Amino acid sequence: MEKKISLPRLGETMETGTITKWCIKVGEEFSRGQIIAEIESDKTTVELPALENGKLIKTLYQEGEEIEVGNDIAIFETI
C-alpha cells in the first residue's frame, strides 16, 4: 500500500523547511525510527524519522528545495 510522507511542523513558528539531505534513496527499504531525511528550518537541522517500515518509491522534492509545512515530500510503500 502506498502512503505519503508530509513535512511536519518542527517548531512553533516553522512555516517552511528545506531538505538538506535524503538519507534513504529511492528503492531502498527502511525501518521504523530510521532517519529518512534531514530538514533545516530556522537555522536548525532536524532528522526526520520513519514512523513505520517501508520502501521509498519516490521523492517529491530535491535536496535544497524549500517546502511549505504540510506538503507531501515523498511516497513510500508499506512492507
Image (cartoon, grey):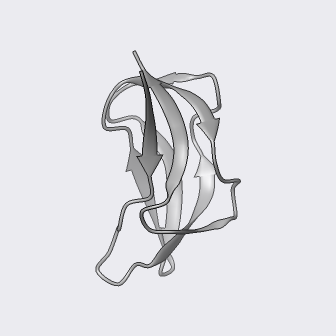
Quarter that holds the N terminus: top left
- Which residue is more in the foreground, 21 or 53? 53
Q: Residue at x 47, y 81 (%)?
A: 42
Q: Quadrant of residue 15?
A: bottom left
Residue 39, image x and y in percent?
Answer: 51, 61
Left/right placement of residue 22 relative to residue 78 reads right
Q: Residue at x 51, y 79 (%)?
A: 43
Q: Above or below — where is 24 with respect to 44? A: above
Q: Residue furthest front?
A: 1
Q: Residue furthest bottom?
A: 13
Q: Residue at x 40, y 78 (%)?
A: 14
Q: Residue furthest top?
A: 79
Residue 71, image x and y in percent?
Answer: 49, 60
Residue 75, image x and y in percent?
Answer: 53, 37
Residue 13, image x and y in percent?
Answer: 35, 84
Q: Above or below — where is 67 with respect to 30? A: below
- Which residue is more in the foreground, 40 or 9? 9
Left/right placement of residue 75 relative to residue 50 reads right
Q: Quadrant of residue 65?
A: bottom right
Left/right placement of residue 50 relative to residue 23 reads left
Quarter that holds the C terminus: top left
Q: Above or below — where is 25 with respect to 72? A: above
- Which residue is more in the foreground, 35 or 4? 4
